[in-house]
Amino acid sequence: MRFTSEQRLDGGVLERAFTLGEIPGILWTPEAAAAPAPLILLGHPGGLERMYPRLAGRARGCVAQGFAATTLELPGSGQRPRDADAEQARADLRRALAAGEKPADEVVDRLVLPLVDRAVPEWRAVLDALLTLPGIGGPVGLAGGLIAIGVRLAVVEPRIAAAVLFAGSYVPRVMLDEARQVTIPLHVLLQWDDEGNDRQLALDLFDAFGSKEKSLHVNMGGHTGVPPYEGDNANRFLARHLT
Amino acid sequence: MRFTSEQRLDGGVLERAFTLGEIPGILWTPEAAAAPAPLILLGHPGGLERMYPRLAGRARGCVAQGFAATTLELPGSGQRPRDADAEQARADLRRALAAGEKPADEVVDRLVLPLVDRAVPEWRAVLDALLTLPGIGGPVGLAGGLIAIGVRLAVVEPRIAAAVLFAGSYVPRVMLDEARQVTIPLHVLLQWDDEGNDRQLALDLFDAFGSKEKSLHVNMGGHTGVPPYEGDNANRFLARHLT
């Protein structure tokens, strides 16, 4: 991991861009912290530059609670090389959604499964690197991003102690079995009228999670309409479980 | 309406018992309020004496936010005369639940519809009486109780501006059409593994509500396991809409 730039944001936030191998990422830490800060992995749908304003806003919320936060570019997004199969699957998914159809399971599988397989080791590698830095200490929380990546991380990465998941993207049905293996506390967000998601699949996924503590917050307003106060709810959930 | 007793509780809360005709009720108000307090109608499943400790706790939470709160005994509960048909229907419902069966729609209808028809005018009458008191002023919020009563009140009582509904009891299917007429902001609580309720019916009801702003908070822990922080969430919802 190599830090490539740093700047100070309002509110005592130090923002550092880094690369992990070829993968760009960002780390936000409190400028003055008494104890090692729990680290929140901020997920997003891909496209770090496009997502930057919202990610920085979420990161400020984390730092205001005494957490550090980080994010990574997804495989095949932003400045990273495209994968022809994934691009084809993404086009197929968009075509189905634009036609008002439910995408076929095999399209979802073709798009999401390879992405999960590639992204999860990268997120784990960033954890390995960041947890050696002074000022950052466990436990680790996860917040947002493609929910299939969150599910896999929650199963395979024991350093993640709690997760906020946004049920706003398709999950391969084969991953419902994986969801049953999740046992950490979960806070799941679902937009009831999400135009790009399958409500029943999201409810089936929530039902499948093996966690004893899991909650689901449903709101209206379409895919991008998560109310601002849900950010506060998510932060309170993370604070309950990480501090 | 006649006040029958009063006491001061910790936290600057004045608690007054009253009767409205033959119906016992309780009013909680801030001892010192600068402006007329919005009024919260606190619902419960019936049995005012048994429910008193939890109701008083909820009322304190309301008063701490600058609200007044009130509750009424339900028809056929507590010290109020029993209705033979309702008792029969209640026994039939309990028998089905104890046997692990879904109660027949006609049993739910026999139990709930007459109760809604009787209770709703009583709650409206208590509103008429309380809103004439100094220190209490609109808007009015509703929180908890049998959800079928809440649905009817939300439709017919224009003074109610926002409602917290607990999807923890059966709603007659014929009332799904009524739910479509609800337009006020709703905050709905659902226990995912509620042993005495039908999850799919609760989800259908949430879907049916006509409100542009509606949210659903799902938790684990069975009928009585609503996490304590959901009380804070409900109070924040009421504060957003009533102040």
Image: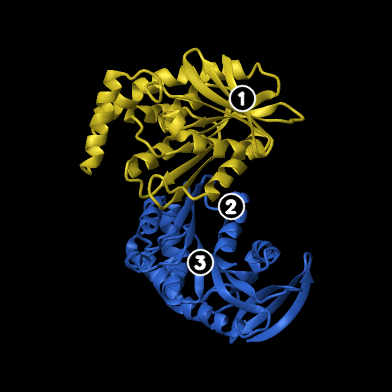
Chain colours: A yellow, B blue
The 10 Å Cα crowd at callout 3, few under 14, some 14 to 19, many 20 or more, is many
Closer to the camera in the image, B135 or A55? A55
Q: Residue at x 55, y 69 (%)?
A: B141
Provide the secondary structure element on which disc 1 rests.
strand
Provide the secondary structure element on which disc 2 rests.
helix
Q: In which chain is the residue bearing label 1?
A: A
| Label 1 vs label 2, nearer the camera | 1
| Label 1 vs label 3, nearer the camera | 1
Going by the numbered disc 2, the residue's amino acid type is Glu
Q: Which label number is shown at residue B7?
A: none
- Residue tagged 3: B162
Mark pair 1, 2: CA separation:
39 Å
Q: How many marks?
A: 3
Going by the numbered disc 3, the residue's amino acid type is Ala
Residue B142 percent coordinates (x, y): 54, 68
Residue B45 seen in the current view: no
The reply, left or right, for residue A92 in relation to residue A197 is: left
Residue farthest along the top direction in this orientation: A21
- Residue tagged 1: A6
Question: Relative to B89, does residue B1 appear above or below in the rendering?
Answer: below
Residue B238 seen in the current view: yes
- Residue tagged 2: B230
